Image (cartoon, helix red, strand yellow):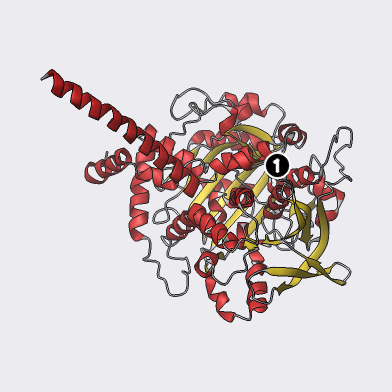
Amino acid sequence: MAAWVWLSALVAVPLVFLCALAKRAWRAHVMRTYTAVPDLAFVGKPRAGGRLQGTAVVCGGSFAGLFTAHVLASHYTRVLVLEPEQWTFTPEARAIPFPHLPHRDVPGEQTPTMRHSRSRVFQFTALHAFQVLLLRFLRRAFHNVEERAADAGIRIGPAHWGVILDGNTLLTPTHKYCGEDHETLFASRRAMESLVRALVAETGDVEGLDGVYPAHDPTIKFVCGTVTSLGLSPDNKSVRNVTYRDERGEVSDVETSLIVDCTGITQAGLKLLSRALNDASLANLRVEYNPKMYYESIVIEGPPDFDERASKLNIVHPVTHQPIDVSRTGFFYAITPHPSGEHRAILLGREEDRFVFGLGGWDSELPPTWDDAIYYARQITNPCPVPEWVFQMLDILAADGRKERITISSHRFTCASRVFYESRADVIPTNFVALGDSTMRLNPRLGEGTTKACLGAITLNALLHERTPDHRSFSKTFFQRLALRTGSLWDASKWLDYGRDTTVPCEGESLAEGRQFRALNRLLYVVFGKNEYAAETFWLGTQWLVPSTDILAPSILWAVLKVALFGK
């Protein structure tokens, strides 16, 4: 008997150990495949053997282009950024803090909007959201990001957004994830882009330059111009040179070792490749649909004692039920409706020294004045009304005539699109990649665009540490990795949008697609308001720190089943 016990122990102990190792290895594989978190370790890491001789060309200089240019500076002796918008070369585009935009009266509108020169970014004045992954990247990429963010008036704090999911308060685990590794940024698009643009351009000690940065990293060169064509190798396997036209109309050629399409919503890379390869069928890689997402951002000044007065509203954390720290909070309240129920959403937060009241939804009406916006918010009753403390906070902001000095920026999002480069990787030149909105443009209601661009740059940087762009599988590997890490974003966003009958689906599809996903999603919303583990898993996924598949854990699915069967 004793021998049998010893034999069982000898078998069981190694088996348990092997199972633990297998579980750990599987988790590492899933994290590496579906997230960019492991690749963060390569950000800022010098290239083994030194930088590659040659020029990497980045087409586009918005968020995607700026992130990409910075990581490429670790790999190439020269990085050329071709940005078509002249305003981005002005001191204002890199000013920290970013100046308040002047008001502009619009004929036929009751409330002024903001006047700006950033013509190629339709969301320049819109409310933005940023995830934890983005701040982790910025901290690794720029040693002084927190100091410069403070100079810009950008708030860094817990990623608590006061989210309401179809009437269910998300049990946000920010009481548990309260360290700097799980913080995020709260900023306007204007201030955030100015910060990143300045950080990429800065070199050495910039103290005392008063927000103007004439010195540039000598590796990175910005040129005002637009790519007009690509020159391929005789076998069409690589891009040899790029032709571009500058702001004076002069045409130039530059030899390139790597070309990155960061042209955003124009998705110019696909057109350039189609012409260079003389392959019109590449246009079929792009699909699009129209969610008819209409929304607006109302910007209002706050009183000097806002934090003190708002603290008296006794806004509590959904898990600890303790009062939140108003001074460190960026978003106070955010409704994420289920499309089969309510079509309207609101968000209340702050950007720098001002506050933003965001409203809108699928085919939504847009209130023209502050009082109309309050009425709009009070009409949201499905599945539950907006709590009274939100309106009390809005009253604090509106007092003393401040509501008469608001600006309203309206936005109409009518085209979500994706380019499936990974499905034709056999014909894509090995040294051509695309990232950010150049490959996928999502409905902006969840605020994922900037972090998506960041993820693309992180993915590209890690791949460059593995192999060079002349490797026959370089672009194929990149697009496959990017698809695995972002494909679920496209599916989830599209299927939720298909739940609203005003959405115009992709060609060949119907709004019935994704019906099962929407049904599961609605049950999950209920679970996220009851089950702390499920809410924590969901929150980590929304911050791009774990794979979206984590939400399919057996315990969470069991909780979903109980809600489906018993309503609890």
Would you say residue 379 is visible in this rendering? no
Residue positioned 23% across, 29% down in the render: 11
Q: Is residue 473 above or below residue 322?
A: below
Residue bearing the label numbered 1: 46
In the picture, the quarter occupied by the N terminus is top left
Q: Is residue 377 above or below residue 207?
A: below
Is 307 or 110 nearer to us in this picture? 307
The answer to whether residue 207 is left or right of residue 415 is right
Q: Secondary structure at mark 1?
A: loop
Q: Is residue 313 shown left or right of residue 300? A: left
Name the residue at the top extreme. Answer: 2
Q: Position of residue 230 (x, y in %)?
A: 72, 72
Q: Amino acid at mark 1?
A: Pro
> Hey, which quadrant is residue 150 in on the image?
top right
Give the residue drawn at x 61%, y 61%.
Answer: 471
The C terminus is located in which quarter?
top left
Label 1: few (<14), some or many (≥20) within 10 Å? Answer: few
x then y, percent, for residue 467: 62, 53
| Residue positioned 45% across, 41% down in the render | 28
Q: Is residue 278 left or right of residue 316?
A: right
Residue 116 locus on image (x, y percent): 78, 55
